[in-house]
Amino acid sequence: MENLKRITFNPEVMGGKPCILGMRVTVGMTVGLVASGQNNQEILEM
C-alpha cells in the first residue's frame, strides 16, 4: 500500500483524528459527506 502523504495525524490538531494535510478537515468528515451523497464540487465549496 502506498504511503498516504495528504493525511496527517497530530494529537494537537482536531483531537488527533486523521486530517487532510494543512487543514482542520477530518478524514471522517469527508467520508461522511461522500456517504451522504455530496459530490466532489459540493464538498470543495463547503
Image (cartoon, rainbow, N blue to C red):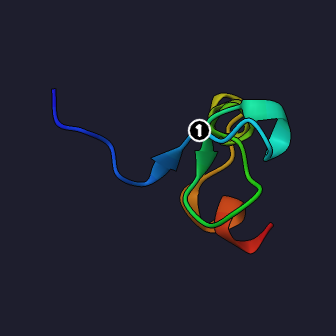
The residue lying at 71 percent from left, 42 percent from top is: 26
Q: Is residue 41 above or below residue 36?
A: below
Q: What residue would you read off at disc 1?
A: 9
- The quarter of the rendered structure image containing the C terminus is bottom right
In this rendering, position of residue 41 left or right of residue 43? left
Q: Amino acid at mark 1?
A: Phe
Q: Position of residue 15 (x, y in %)?
A: 84, 33
Assign a secondary structure to mark 1.
loop
Q: How many marks?
A: 1
Q: Position of residue 21 (x, y in %)?
A: 55, 59
The residue lying at 35 percent from left, 52 percent from top is: 5
Q: Could you classify mark 1 by the number of other residues whose Cα lies within 10 Å: few (under 14), some (14-19), or many (20 or more)?
A: some
Residue sitting nearer the eye, 2 or 38:
2
Residue sitting nearer the eye, 13 or 25:
13
Q: Position of residue 20 (x, y in %)?
A: 58, 53
Most extreme residue toward the left is: 1
- The quarter of the rendered structure image containing the N terminus is top left
Most extreme residue toward the front is: 12
Image quarter for residue 28?
A: top right
The residue lying at 72 percent from left, 40 percent from top is: 33
Q: Position of residue 38 (x, y in %)?
A: 68, 47
